[in-house]
Image (cartoon, coloured by chain):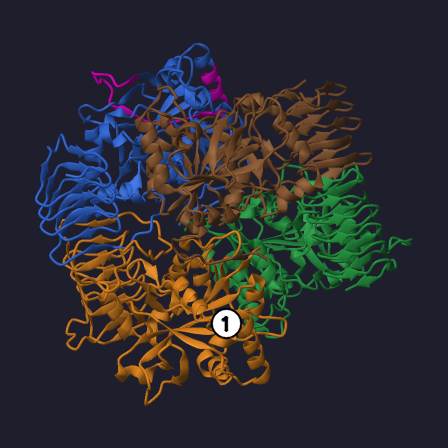
Chain colours: A green, B orange, C brown, D blue
Amino acid sequence: MPKEEIMAMLLAGGKGTRLGVLTKNIAKPAVPFGGEYRLIDFPLSNCSNSGITTVGVLTQYKPLILNSYIGSGSSWDLDRNDGGVTVLPPYVKEGGGSWYKGTADAIYQNIEFIDLNDPEYVLILSGDHIYRMDYSEMLAYHKSKNSEVTIGVLEVPWADTNRFGIMNTNEDQKIIEFQEKPEQAKNNLASMGIYIFNWEQLRKYLIAEAEANNDSAGDFGHNIIPTMMDDKINFYAYKFEDYWKDVGTIESYWQAHMDLLGEKPELELQSRNWMIYSVNPNRPPQYLAESAQVNNSLINKGTQVMGKIIDSVLFFGVKIGRDAVVENSVILPNTRIASGAKIKNAIIGSNVIVEKAAQIGQEAANNEITVIGDDEIIPANSNIKAGMVVG
Amino acid sequence: MPKEEIMAMLLAGGKGTRLGVLTKNIAKPAVPFGGEYRLIDFPLSNCSNSGITTVGVLTQYKPLILNSYIGSGSSWDLDRNDGGVTVLPPYVKEGGGSWYKGTADAIYQNIEFIDLNDPEYVLILSGDHIYRMDYSEMLAYHKSKNSEVTIGVLEVPWADTNRFGIMNTNEDQKIIEFQEKPEQAKNNLASMGIYIFNWEQLRKYLIAEAEANNDSAGDFGHNIIPTMMDDKINFYAYKFEDYWKDVGTIESYWQAHMDLLGEKPELELQSRNWMIYSVNPNRPPQYLAESAQVNNSLINKGTQVMGKIIDSVLFFGVKIGRDAVVENSVILPNTRIASGAKIKNAIIGSNVIVEKAAQIGQEAANNEITVIGDDEIIPANSNIKAGMVVG
Amino acid sequence: MMMTPVYRKGGRNMNNVMAIINNALNESFLEQLTSHRSLASVPFAARYRLIDFPLSNLVNSGVTNVGILLQTKYRSLMDHIGFGKAWDLDRKKNGLFLLPPSHIYQANTPYKGDLQNFYSNLEYIEKSNQEYVIITSPNVAANIDYRDAFNYHLENNNDITIMYKKINNFRPNTQYSVINTDDNDRVIDMQVDPHQKDYKKVSLQRYIMKKDLLLAIIDSCVSKGKWDFVKNAIIGNLDSLKVYGYPFHSYATIINSINGYYKSNLEILKPSVWQDIFLKNGPIYTKPKDEAPTAYKNGARAQNILAANGCLIEGAVENSVLFRGVKVARGAVVKNSIIMQKSELGKNAHLENVILDKDVKITANKSLKGDINLPMIVAKNTSI
Amino acid sequence: MMMTPVYRKGGRNMNNVMAIINNALNESFLEQLTSHRSLASVPFAARYRLIDFPLSNLVNSGVTNVGILLQTKYRSLMDHIGFGKAWDLDRKKNGLFLLPPSHIYQANTPYKGDLQNFYSNLEYIEKSNQEYVIITSPNVAANIDYRDAFNYHLENNNDITIMYKKINNFRPNTQYSVINTDDNDRVIDMQVDPHQKDYKKVSLQRYIMKKDLLLAIIDSCVSKGKWDFVKNAIIGNLDSLKVYGYPFHSYATIINSINGYYKSNLEILKPSVWQDIFLKNGPIYTKPKDEAPTAYKNGARAQNILAANGCLIEGAVENSVLFRGVKVARGAVVKNSIIMQKSELGKNAHLENVILDKDVKITANKSLKGDINLPMIVAKNTSI
């Protein structure tokens, strides 16, 4: 097997607590997105399009669904004779096992796997951001700067800097200081949680951290990077200037869907320049009945629409009954909305049944989002108030 | 996904302690066999040839190698759009995790995976036996007998019955008593560790056992089967009458290789009626030099033979130097035997270098087997005495 | 839920049946639609190709060894089928076999008929380890479970079983093979494309027989210089063999004319029909294509349509079938039309009763109108 | 260890190069060996087909988009190549493309030459997103890294680069294309199969050029009714374009005669040659076949042989090449011979200087003997 120049390690273990009922049965990276996708499709497609063909996916919470979703990796063109995609649950070693303590610990526990692939560089990614990015450009930047650690950053409003890890850089983009959620930020470049490390060097730091400090949180931001900073390692910031969204909360998840709509959405899913791949379920074409009305919406295959859809996203397998109205909402796979139901400003989970004339979030005034968890049944004529969470 | 009639769960976690240095780096089912294969190729090929296309492989000890060896399962025609082969390391759940306590506990911990496939029957297999078997015949037998548990059995010499789980059967092959390693056996039908259960029923017993008894060894032979017996569940024995070998010890592993040689070997690897598949590494053809002498031996591709090979098995990538003599031995992949070396009654691990004129096991008198572990270097002119284990 | 049984070898199990999809048929009736592709790869029903139907039917029935006879223009078919992964037929044993025509061995000899294609692939048929064979064709779209028909074939001890459907209204200018049966469904007459249709039972071009019988018939026909599968191999043996019909009662459409192709697409807009054809006996599989969901923009109107993914609709679409990646600009109107992959309509363009092949560009303000019984066809890559 | 870099788009990277393997060549010189298969799928070197060499060379050099021009008898080639999985070319983007001949679109028109194959696949070439193209052929077996040649092509600003090898001894009755260059390796003359070989530089039939140049040359040739790739597209442009040679120094063999085929197989028995060809610039990939190790039974003798897996040797084999599944019964002797897949020798059979095609059965006590310069060929499936 030839040595790889770079491989990616994708941290996909997150439980996504802030997504509430949407992650009851599945890990956050497996959460459906955009009518057709799951969150993890974005970093996996980015890897594939960037020419990175060896990817380890570190799972943890609810790993079976992700494991079967990823399969051989062929959906992302990552079924390779050498390398390809490998799902890595935190397996129990002879001495027992535990969940990863943090991002760096997750990599530490998979040193053996990375060593098998023997890469020059390791790209660390997380599985819950919506963006299109060419990692090969970042690698070229890393090499051209003679960087030892390159961190993807994006400009955030100064007011939000206290929510991020902030990179204080010089005019050459060299990072001279790292501030974790600072009250007084010196810069507005926030870490995207995307790192390129030189593997040989990172490996040493991971082992040193694990051996020196049993109580370490095993986190890149809190442990490894500060230590490396102290050692005067060369850090560079790589500025990303396209659409990027962390969909870690119900609000941002809903908003990211609304961002897909409109005349010129910031993230154009249909663009073929940088395809987002997915497992692509086999379903019949979408059927819009004589009585259907659709406006400013994304509708996936396998759907049957007899009602009215406004400013909404419908996943595959969704059925919308006659005279039902769906507005400003996201309807997840295989959910059925019976005739006469009215849904507004809502996220409706997978396999939900909304029975006849049920009302969901109708009186939403300040954009409160109503959420119905997977597999719920909303009885006929019931009224789920705006902002409620069912499930 | 249509419901499967039967799926297989293959217990491949064994450390294979009795195989000593051969399982230093790999799990027992990953141990090379027969010049081309690994032990796990036998049950996987049996599944494929029997038409069983959903297989869970339960790994535990050193799971990475097995994981990458199995890959998408295409080598065994088990890369299916539905089902196929899935590798299941004992992953750490939210509450922590531990290695499987026993065979039944391994199945218990994977109930969720089996439920996803929703089979009528579950076939339990182990990953370290050499045999060709049509499990679909066993299933037909199970159904025709209205059996609730069917156990694969074979006749063993009466003298050996105290080493096995013995099935005492009536004339209809119904099992009326189960004796675990009895001193006074009532029968000579030994369990092969191959079971067909009705999943719904087994599921209940597994849960009951786990809930009732925290100290349970979680073993089919010790816990589940005796409880089921007590409950008067219908057990039937399915008699297997072809070649079968447990290769759990150095002696039986070596002997199983010798069984492949001779004019009419009991297990004919070249037979195309029931192919044994393997990952089939890409290697150049084997090259036998002008100076080569070969007799009663199996030689795989990618080998270069300049010396003398008698009654031996050479795996891929092996190089045998001029005037070297290999006799009654098994040479594992990518090992180099330099010129003038002499090897007798030995198992030489993978990636070993036997330097010039080294002597291994030359004075073997009573078939003592000499073993060299993986990656060892045997210095020039050294003499490894018969029966020694290096590594 | 349906259960996938572990078949034992031989006997009455569907893994004792192989299939041949006969793609060596006259296909000129589809005019421009088949000028660069074979009938089998003609797009159908918003996201399929015609061959998806017979192939998926076989797979859903448990057949795991399928040979596809190729004759002409099969490049797009090869691209579509690949190694059969979409149908789970990319297998070590059995699986999918593309069977090229004999002229790749003997160039420049005149073509005699489809039995030549069977004949030049005798080795494949002989070496297959099934006892029975189903012969099908790409020009019938339906959702067929062959298991009942196969059981009937065995229990009735038929030599040949022909699936048929009773039809009361024949489409004009469409080729049908019709059969006449006695009260026990024994086939006593069969006619290929007769002017005068005396019989109402239409052959669905699905034949079940023993593989050995097929081999014997091919041998006998070829040795006598007879080269037509239906006329010689089947009709020629009605007297000497036990040939029985097996009725099919669900939706099936025979695509043997442009009119039939057009009407069949529109027929599938009826919920009862698409439920029959897409869902009844198992899914219809097709090569997966990566496409985002279809976007309906502000002001779009879409009623009574079937659409694939990746479309961008700003105008109005009704009673129409849209394949993937179709674009309908603001003010454009599409009515009773079939729009194939990646075709685009400019602003205020109007289409009525039109079939646009792939990659057609209709610029702004253009208007095309065919008749509901004579749709206008616009060839692939046309720009107007 | 070699490193697989992540290529950025365009420029001097090998992912900016596509390749076409021209399998539309005259292949009749291999007589019975090509009567049922194309040159590309002729078995070679114990476990390969000829096409494995050019295809693996391209993949090992980092080329990820390869089109294979097909002309005749390509069924076995399709079986062998499949979707390119063995070469990791079963990809969503780029990958492997089988390009059928034009006669699948226009049957019964006479074949004019290999440029017709290029011409009928212009769309594939145009749509490929690489700027450069390597054109290769299946009849040269070598282990070539194209990266240096491509860099030379770029740095020297060549229009066309032709790989060549200097040869001192030409095999008799073998077709060679030879070139003459000036001191800077500029190609000033080129001849296809001349009787009198004045030049010692033999074209390895590997050409590098810009894709746009290839398209322009095809257009120009076809519009003037010129249909031969080497004679018209290359030789016809020697004066007007910067055509340079690039020397190849490792082992390469040109298989343009039975004698060349036979001798090349035997040549590979030399360790220096098989190390060059199997190991030097990366592995040669081939379709994996499930086979047990080869068994040498009691009393077997095997010296100076290359053998694939699955053989069963009870007799004596020397200076020979055995493909998979060959059986040599007790007392049989094989010398200086090439035995293809699954052929069997009965007891005490003798072969010397013989090529057995696939599935040949030689019964007990039979003896066949060719000459070392005129081997005897036994066709596929023969039993004697």
**Which of the 4 quarters of the picture holds residue A102?**
bottom right
| Residue D268 screen position, x and y as percent | 22, 40
The amino acid marked with disc number 1 is Lys
The image quarter containing residue B170 is bottom left
Q: Residues within 10 Å of mark 1 (few under 14, many from 20)?
A: some
Q: Report the chain holding disc 1.
A: A
- In the figure, C303 relative to B54: above or below? above
In the picture provided, is B243 more to the left or to the right than D267?
Answer: right
Q: Is residue A378 left or right of residue C162?
A: right
Determine if residue A125 is in view. Answer: yes
Q: What residue do we see at 43% from left, 51% from top?
A: C15
x then y, percent, for residue B124: 45, 69
Image coords of residue A257 (percent x, y) = 76, 48
Residue identifier under label 1: A93
Residues shaded magenta? D191-219
Q: Residue at x 73, y 23 (%)?
A: C351
- Name the outermost residue toward the front: C183
Looking at the image, the residue that sits furthest to the bottom is: B184
Confirm whether residue A144 shows in the render: no
Q: Mark 1: which secondary structure? A: loop
Image position, residue A318 (x, y; %): 72, 49
Q: Nearer the viewer, residue A76 or B119?
A: B119
- Does D312 appear above or below D281? below
Judge whether C25 appears above or below B96 on screen. above
Most foreground residue, B298 or C80: C80
